[in-house]
Structure formats: structure tokens, C-alpha cells
Image: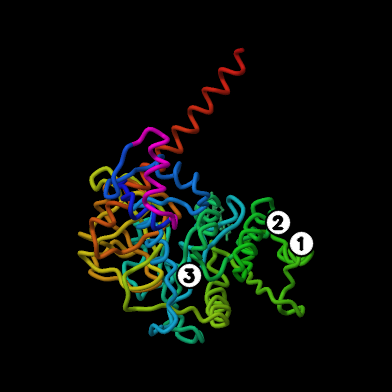
Amino acid sequence: TEGISVKDLAEKLDVRGKDLIASLLMKGVFVTVNQSLEGELVKDVARQFGADAQVISVEEQLENEAIEGFLEDTTGMVEIARSPVVTVMGHVDHGKTSLLDAIRSTDVASGEAGGITQHIGAYKVHVTKPDSPAFGREIVFLDTPGHEAFTRMRARGAKITDIVVVVVAADDGVMPQTLEAIDHARAAKVPIIVAVNKIDKPDANPAKVIQQLAARGLQPSNQGGDTEFVEVSAKKRIGLDLLEEMICLVADISAPKAVLDRPAVGTVIEAKLDRGRGAVASILVQNGTLRLGDSYIVGNTFGKIRAMFDDRGRSITEAGPSTPVEILGLESMPDAGDTFLVMADRDKAKGIAQYRKMKEREAQLAKSSRVSLEGLAEQI
Ligand code: GTP
Ligand code: MG
């Protein structure tokens, strides 16, 4: 932490420098007006002068700027339509990943049909059915981020998804995580589309699923409600076109937009340690354009884009809004849900990353000392 001079602090607290010096003297601290004060001492005297004004460090100030950068008001900037981002959620084994794989394999426009090895948890799919009203459009799909990551994103006001597709297996019906997914979507104020999956199964009962969900307030649109239900089979590839069409239809209601020409802003979808490649992160660029050479801050780490890849593992040089990318060369691992922000000033990015790391360490220390104190109390 860099300090603050006595003079500046006095100004901030709206007191005379003389009074501040006197008060420090009482604490046994001898200073002159131009001397610099740090951390606890600053908080201490500030408190003494009745300032509930938070004393924030340089890094904290940078951090605030970073958050403001992330949430930057884009009114007045030129916005373009961007592809909708869809998160697929639902109960375990109800077929989320199968559904995504099936949809992805219909996208012959992206090439390499069948040869999909990359798993970055996020894909951009082109609607390729020629007679579909959504033909030629793109949809970004996210395989369920852990509920925790989703909650974290939401808590920060970072809205990552435009639509939630809740997958319900027609043979299994509504289950606890189905309801959880619905709660998440509702809390995030994101429209829900229900994909009733596995309709190829002999014991499938889609009508029952619809009934169960209607009882939870998800009224089907064909019964006067506002929720779209689509019956699908990931296995037999039934209803996939219709699902894509519905997604585009629902997306058109909110008509998501983004600014092309601004420093990129995004969210970490997942991060992993890759044997040959080190820390690798999948990021969804949400706003602006990410380019090779950009410096960035992400979570409590920072770096520079030396290489990036699209969802098919192809090397790319720039990525616009609603584009999932994989980036390499991170100094350490960010977490899913962390915000990603391009910062022209690399030192600033580094400063914020270090500050966040320090905060994290402090929090961990506080936690572990609390735990050991509790342990002690139990022994007594
Ligand atoms: P988690 O990620 O573990 O929560 O599961 P998931 O929801 O991604 O389910 P996944 O796609 O892994 O599918 C679970 C099982 O259901 C697999 O054995 C799939 O083959 C099967 N399955 C998925 N979709 C269908 C379908 O449409 N019909 C049939 N018969 N089986 C399906
Ligand atoms: Mg899965």
C-alpha cells in the first residue's frame, strides 16, 4: 500500500493539518505535513475525526475503477446486435451435455463435423437448417457452470446469460436440481425455455413434465402462459431445430446488444491447469473486442494475450462480443465466474491482481485463525 500524506489526509477529513498532527502526537506518532501515513494508522485517525469515510488504498481505488470499467455505462456508445448466450441447466444426467453435443454436431458450417475434441464449456453454434427462420444466426451455449459460479456471477451483477434452457428428462420428471435451475434463472431475471429431453424413451412422459412445471408457475405458451416448452431427444436428434428457433425467438424479445469498439470485458467460464500449456481459461467475451497483445486483469491474476483459440481450437487474433475463447499464459488460475477486463495499463492490472491476492490471503488467514481459536475453545 502506498500511503497518504498528512496534508492530503487532513484535506480529505476536512480538518486542519495542525489538528491532525496534534492528534497523531497524542498517539506518540511524530509527523510533518508532508510525511506519509499508512494503513491502520490512517484508519485510526480517520475514525478519531469521526470519518466514516472509508480509507481506501491505491489498489482498492484501482479495483473500484476496474469494477466501474466492467460495469461501464455504454449508453451513447454505438451498439450492435450480438448473439444470444444460452446456459443449459438441469438435473444431473438429464442430458445437458448430450443435448449440446447434438446441437453442436448439426453445425456443419463450423467444420470438423464429428471431430470435436475441445471442451471449453462454451460453444458458438450456427443455425444451419436452411428453412429455419433462424437460419444463419448464431447462438452461444454454455454447459452448466457450477451453480456456485452462476451465483457468484449474479452476486456481482455480471449477467452472463440471456436465456436459461432447463433440461428435464421426460422419463425422470422434475427433480431437485430442475427446481434449483429454475430458481437461478428467476433470480437472475432470465427467460426460461424448457427442453423436455429423452422423448425417445419408451417410458417418457412429456405431458407429466409439462404439468409438473405448470404447477410451479411455468405455464406453456400454447396454454396461454409465457414459457416455451420444446420436446427433444438428444440421442435421436429430435426437436433440435425447433429448440434453436425458439431460442432465437425468445432472444429477439430482449434483443441483446454490445459495443464492438471498446476494451474487452468478459467472464471466466472455466479454468484448468493443462499439462503442456499451463493455466488455461475459457472466457466469454461479453462486450468489446479482445485482441492479441491486450493486457488484462482477471480475478486475482493478470496477463497479456499471446495466443487465443476459438471453441474449435483454432487460433484467432480477435474476438468480439458473445464469443467464447480460450486464453493461455495466465500467471495463475482464475476462478469460474471471475470477471475479465482488458486494461491498457499493464502495471495497473498487476497492481489490482496483487491487491486482490493479498485480500484473499488475509481472508484465509482470518478464517484459519478463527478455526484454531474455536478449536482451542472446544478444548478448554
Ligand atoms: P451431468 O453433466 O452429469 O449433470 O449430466 P448431463 O445432464 O450432462 O447428462 P448427459 O448428457 O451426460 O446424459 C446422461 C445420460 O443420458 C447419458 O447416458 C446419455 O446417453 C443419456 N441421454 C441423454 N440424452 C438422451 C436422450 O435424448 N435419449 C436417451 N435415450 N438417452 C439420453
Ligand atoms: Mg454434463
Q: CA distance from mark 1 to mark 2?
A: 7 Å
The quadrant the C terminus occupies is top right
Q: Earlier in the sequence, mark 1 or mark 2?
A: 2
Tags 1 and 2 in contact by the CB under 8 Å rule? yes
Is residue 356 depicted above or below 80 in this figure? above
Q: Residue at x 47, y 68 (%)?
A: 103
Which label sits in the foreground, 3 or 1? 3
Look at mark 2 in the image and give the residue it sits on. Answer: 174
Which label sits in the foreground, 2 or 3? 3
Q: Is residue 110 left or right of residue 347?
A: right
Residue 298: percent from the left, percent from the top? Answer: 35, 55
Circle 1: is it few (<14), some (14-19), or many (20+) Cα within 10 Å? some
Q: Residue at x 65, y 54 (%)?
A: 180
- Which quadrant of the view contains residue 29? top left
The quadrant the N terminus occupies is top left
| SS under mark 2 | loop
Look at mark 3 in the image and give the residue it sits on. Answer: 85
Residue 15: percent from the left, percent from the top? Answer: 43, 54
Q: Identify the amino acid type marked 3.
A: Val
Residue 83: percent from the left, percent from the top? Answer: 44, 76
Q: CA distance from mark 2 to mark 3?
A: 24 Å
Q: Is residue 111 left or right of residue 232?
A: left
Q: Identify the amino acid type marked 1.
A: Gln
Q: Is residue 374 left or right of residue 30?
A: right
Q: CA distance from mark 3 to mark 1?
A: 27 Å
Tags 3 and 1 in contact by the CB under 8 Å rule? no
- Total marks shown come to 3
Q: What's the magenta region?
A: 13-29
Is residue 245 depicted above or below 54 in this figure? below
Look at mark 1 in the image and give the residue it sits on. Answer: 212
Is residue 158 depicted above or below 133 in this figure? above
